[in-house]
Image: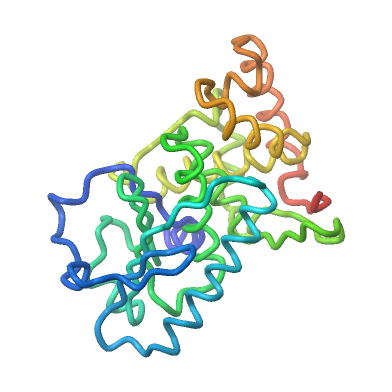
Amino acid sequence: MRSAIILSIIIAVNFFSCYTWKARVPWEAQTPVITDDFSIFAEPGLDERETTRAVREASLIRKELADKFFPGSKKEKILLILYRNAASYEKYRLIELPTQADYERYKNRINIPVDAPAYVWRHEIAHAILESIRPGAPYWLQEGLAVFLQNQTFSTAACGSSVRMPPELGVLLPGMRQTPDLSPSTFHDYRTGAEAAGLSAGVAGYFVFFLWKKRMLLDLLGRYSRETNSSPEFLLTGGNIERWRSLCEEFRAWIRTEEPLAALPGC
């Protein structure tokens, strides 16, 4: 049950080559439908109205996240593989975890059922935007930002909304609090098991939430997109290893409080 809860929230980002697992979906050889935001390969038989609705909503999500976190950034098309439903996605699923959708980083490609919940779309689009802005973000930023953003709705015009982590991720906090050397850089890939992979993604998500609390996240993302020779760790600390250790220690102390479960201002 614990693993099922984690996997219902964490939508894994795929950092590994998929060619040895399954062949590409057969309809990817077709000519894609091109929009301002996406190159779309829809499963044959998918209702055109469903495709149009899903792409329209995905475009709105992309605009909202890009405007808030990467204003003025260059827009590159994201590859979308659309499936009729969850059962069809499962048939062609590339990753060896029972996920609801997945993102292939090496192709900047989202594989997703057309009727996936909004938070799933937000998670995967967050992955793709960050990769489009600057490829190769470390796991804690790539997965952490997606986990953080999947349940948020931001307005660039007002600060009335609140920001909080998905409540279901609270099941991960006891394990985090019992880890003495907890670090956002810790990574367990999916082959170590769903719980370990979920814990890594949860730590990354809470660390990004922690940076939001400290009002460091927007500045980090802006600089990360501009200063392409600097790592996010360098941008957070000026390259001072002691500052990074101090930030991680502050994060560990914060995780042991009740603040990770609370809501924060949306600006």
Where residue 21 sits: x, y (%)?
Answer: 15, 54
Q: Quadrant of residue 59?
A: bottom right
Q: Is residue 134 above or below residue 227?
A: below
Q: Is residue 72 above or below residue 5?
A: above
Residue at image position (62%, 17%) is 244
Where residue 248 sits: x, y (%)?
Answer: 63, 24
Task: Please state which of residues 38 and 98 is positioned toward the viewer in this rendering.
Answer: 38
Figure label count: 0
Task: Please state which of residues 134 and 104 is positioned toward the viewer in this rendering.
Answer: 134
Task: Please state which of residues 166 and 194 is positioned toward the viewer in this rendering.
Answer: 166
Q: Quadrant of residue 4?
A: bottom left
Residue at image position (55%, 27%) is 183
Where residue 96 sits: x, y (%)?
Answer: 26, 55
Residue at image position (32%, 86%) is 46
Where residue 132 sits: x, y (%)?
Answer: 46, 46
**Quadrant (top left, top right, bottom left, bottom right) of the N terminus:** bottom left
Task: Please state which of residues 110 and 181 is positioned toward the viewer in this rendering.
Answer: 110
Q: Is residue 212 above or below residue 66?
A: above
Residue at image position (55%, 51%) is 147
Q: How is the image coloured?
A: rainbow
Q: Would residue 60 appear left or right of 26 to someone viewing this image? A: right
